[in-house]
Image (cartoon, grey):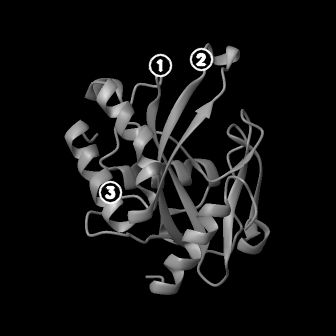
Amino acid sequence: MTDKAGLFSIINKYNCVFAREEHRTVPLASYLHRNTTDQLYNRKNFDGHITTSAFIIDEGKEEILLLHHKSLGKWLQPGGHTEKDDSFVASALREVVEETGISNLHLHYQPVHPDVDVPFDVDSHYIPPNPRKNEEGHYHHDLRYVFFYSGDRTNDFNTDEATAMQWLAFDKLTDDAIFGIVVSKLRTFLATIRPV
């Protein structure tokens, strides 16, 4: 995976694309300063670790795919820990396929920058302790990407990861504490591009 210098480069490019969001990359940058490259992706590093996720958007509607996360008990976009993936985009795509059952043939990545690993969104959030997994509380520094979906919605989600899956209209998420800022960004983004 990408080393610290590569991640700082991605942060700088993200801050150029989303100039009003530099404050959202501060926790990630601070984390990078505190940790060596080999610690960044280690899920037993309880200072935190890098994760990836994806906003799956139906091509024909303003709807986003959410999973009801089994461990956290919340509706979230598919995503998770990085593995030995070739890129952050590949990591996010792998997680989507694993968690939703959607074939990658029905997922179309939409980059926000010529460097395809520059995310659509960056979010650092606290994950509470999980005694069952012997995990302390820690932070996930999540790099989030946008994929358009072109299938017929007949997918079987991974019941090891989630208890339910649903498509939700942007309008139902506008005032949501987690997704409100994302929906606003998505609407602006969708107005400037066409699905590929």
Residue at x 76% of width, y 74% of height:
171
Q: Is residue 84 left or right of residue 63?
A: left
Establish if 69 lies above or below 170. Answer: above
Residue at x 78% of width, y 39% of height:
73
- The residue beneath circle 3 is 117
Residue at x 67% of width, y 39% of height:
161
Q: Mark 1 vs mark 2: which is more N-terminal?
A: 1
Q: Determine contact: label 1, label 2, CB under 8 Å.
A: yes
Q: Secondary structure at mark 3?
A: loop
Establish if 164 lies above or below 33. Answer: below
CA neighbours of label 2 inside 10 A, class few (<14), some (14 to 19), many (20+) = some
Establish if 151 lies above or below 12. Answer: below
* Figure quadrant of residue 118: bottom left
- The residue beneath circle 2 is 135
Residue 125 point in image, percent of width and height: 57, 39
Quote the CA–CA distance across marks 1 and 3.
Answer: 24 Å
Residue 68 point in image, percent of width and height: 75, 47
Type of amino acid at the residue the image marks with label 3: Asp
Type of amino acid at the residue the image marks with label 2: Glu
Q: Nearer the viewer, residue 91 or 24?
A: 24
CA neighbours of label 1 inside 10 A, class few (<14), some (14 to 19), many (20+) = few
Q: Determine contact: label 1, label 3, CB under 8 Å.
A: no
Residue at x 79% of width, y 69% of height:
172
- The residue beneath circle 1 is 44
